Image (cartoon, rainbow, N blue to C red):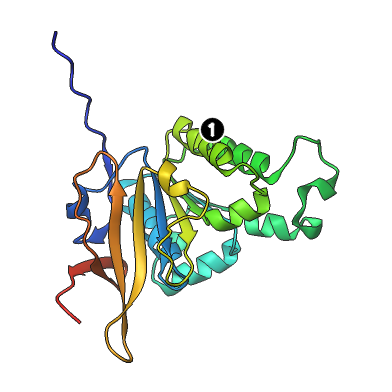
Amino acid sequence: MIIPRPMAKRRIKTYIEGFDEYLNGGIPEGHVIIIAGTSGAMKTSLAWSILYHNALEDGRKGLYMTFEQSAESIIEQMDSFNLPYTDVEGKVEIVDVATMRSAVPGGKIESLGTEESWSWTFVVEELLKRYKRQFGFELLVFDSVNVYEMIAEVTEPRLELYNFFQLLKQLKVTALITSEMAPESTTYCHLGESFLADGIIHLKMDQVDRIREQRRIKCVKMRGTKHNSDYFTLYYEGKHFSTSSIIGK
């Protein structure tokens, strides 16, 4: 009996010059990826860049769901990086949960007098379903999982996060989920998301000498992909991120 080999998944390019080649061409379609790093490591900018270039170069529709910064703040920040929203308007939608939260007294959705079953988890999942149905996005940026866990008041992390990750799989989207790490921490996510995720990309700042730091990027894991697990120096210039091998300090 001949067992048919599974079809290779299409790849979503990161458009990080010199990095996709170490991922066999990019992120496998349908994967849920954690982009983890400390504050200032450019997690948001990198995630937006992937969304931006996939929309601009490949016509792939994207959804950016923000829990920390307002949509206006995200747009201003990306304009400063020469990755303007106007370039991809109509192909990328921004869902501003941060502003929704600020409009709710105390940030508690129960204060609106909604049905008992309503919660931020319910709202977020319904928003994702609606945008998938009406807009048909293929690539999702979820920024950040830390704030989502806080507002959703996750009480059973393994079960609730498992169900959420399963929803992303059912929606058939490729998801990039940012995760804030504490300085000096070696834990990419604190509620077990790293076990559930298909891949982890780690960003960090590395001290080069007494006054200089450089950003580093590493693919910690990527299911279904033979990848290079070294750290690379991460640069940003013009409209693109790029990498190079670390020669020495």
- Give the quadrant of residue 73: bottom right
User: In this picture, is 167 found above or below 174?
Assistant: above
Point 22% across, 32% down: residue: 8
Q: Is residue 235 left or right of residue 171?
A: left
Point 20% across, 82% down: residue: 249
Q: Which of 154 and 233 is in front in this view?
A: 154
- Residue 42, x across and y down, in percent: 41, 68
- Residue 217, x across and y down, in percent: 29, 64
Going by the numbered disc 1, the residue's amino acid type is: Arg
Q: Specify whether residue 38 is in view.
A: yes
Q: In this view, does 26 lie to the left or right of 137?
A: left
Q: Which of 247 and 68 is in front in this view?
A: 247
User: In this picture, is 115 found above or below 80?
Assistant: above
Point 65% across, 42% down: residue: 121
- Residue 5, x across and y down, in percent: 18, 22
Q: Specify whether residue 14 is in view.
A: no
Q: How many marks?
A: 1
- Residue 93, x across and y down, in percent: 51, 50
Point 61% across, 63% down: residue: 70
User: In this picture, is 197 found above or below 232?
Assistant: above
Q: In this view, does 105 lie to the left or right of 52?
A: right
Q: Say what secondary structure mark 1 lies in.
A: helix
How many other residues sit within 10 Å of disc 1, few (<14), some (14-19) or many (≥20)?
few
Name the residue beneath numbered marker 1.
133
| Quadrant into which the N terminus falls | top left
